[in-house]
Amino acid sequence: MRVVEFVFAIGWAGFWIYWIVAALHMKKGHASWSRDLRVRAVIAIFVLLLIRVGAFRNGSFNSDPWRAGVGLVLFAFGLGFAIWARLHIGRNWGTPMSQKDEPELVTSGPYRLIRHPIYFGLLLAGVGTAVALRWMWLIALALVGMYFVYSATVEEHYLTEQFPDAYPTYKRATKMLVPFVF
C-alpha cells in the first residue's frame, strides 16, 4: 500500500509546483496580510498541537483497495477541478482574500457552477486523500475547510464592493463552495 502513499505524495507535490509557477503570472494586487496572517497562524498552531499530541501518528493505514481506488478518483477529480478553475480565471487569480488592481468578474466555466471552485477542488482532493490513506486527515481537512469558508466570505465582501450590480446577481444564482448544496 506504500505505492498509494507515493502516488498521493507525487500528486500533491506536482500540483503545488504547478500552483507556485502559475502564481508568477497573475495580475498585480494587494492582500490584507494582517488578517490573513492571524487566521493562518491560528490554524498552524492548532495543526502543530495535533501533531504534538500524535493525532496523525500510528493511525490505521488503509489497506482496502476499494477505498484507495475511490480516494484516488476523488483526489484526481478534485485537483483537476481546481486546475480547471485556475486556468479559467487566468491572471485574475490571487492568493486568498487578495484584491486585484484591475479586477474582472469571472462567471463562466467552473465559476458558473460555484463561486469558489478552486476551494471546492482542493477540499475534494483532500477528502480523496483521507479516504485513501487515513481518516485522521479529515481533522486537518476540516481546518482547511473552515479557512476556505472564511476566505470565501471575505472575498465575497470585496467582490460585492467591486461589482455592486453584477456580483449580487451572480451570488444568488450560484452556490458558494459545493455545487447544488452550499
Image: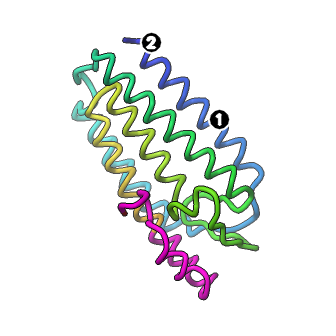
Residue 40, quarter of picture:
bottom left
Question: Mark 1 — residue?
Answer: 17
**Vertical placement of residue 127 versus 108, above or below:** above
Q: Residues within 10 Å of mark 1 (few under 14, many from 20)?
A: few
Residue type at numbered disc 2: Val
Where residue 59 appears, as percent x and y from the top left, is 23, 24
Type of amino acid under label 1? Ile
Residue 117's spot in the image, x, y percent? 53, 55
How many marks do you count on the picture?
A: 2
Structural distance between the alpha carbons of marks 1 and 2: 21 Å
For residue 52, above or below residue 87: above
Q: Residue at x 76, y 73 (%)?
A: 102
The secondary structure that dominates the magenta segment is helix
**Left of 172 or right of it: where is 58?**
left
Residue 3: give its label: 2
The residue depicted at 43 percent of the width and 58 percent of the height is 179
Question: Which image quadrant: the C terminus?
Answer: bottom left
Residue 12 horizontal/vertical position (percent): 53, 32
Would you call the spot at circle 2 few (<14 residues within 10 Å), some (14-19), or many (20 or more)?
A: few
Q: Does 178 lie within the magenta span?
A: yes
Q: Quadrant of the N terminus?
A: top left
Q: Position of residue 3 (x, y in %)?
A: 44, 12
Q: Is residue 136 left or right of residue 69?
A: left
Q: How is the image coloured?
A: rainbow
Q: What is the secondary structure assignment of the residue under circle 1?
A: helix
Any mark on residue 66, and which?
none
Lateral position of residue 97 relative to residue 39, left or right: right
> What span is in magenta?
153-181
Q: Residue at x 61, y 30 (%)?
A: 14
The vertical placement of 159 against 117, above or below, is below
Image check: 103 left or right of 3?
right
Q: Nearer the N terminus, badge 1 or badge 2?
A: 2
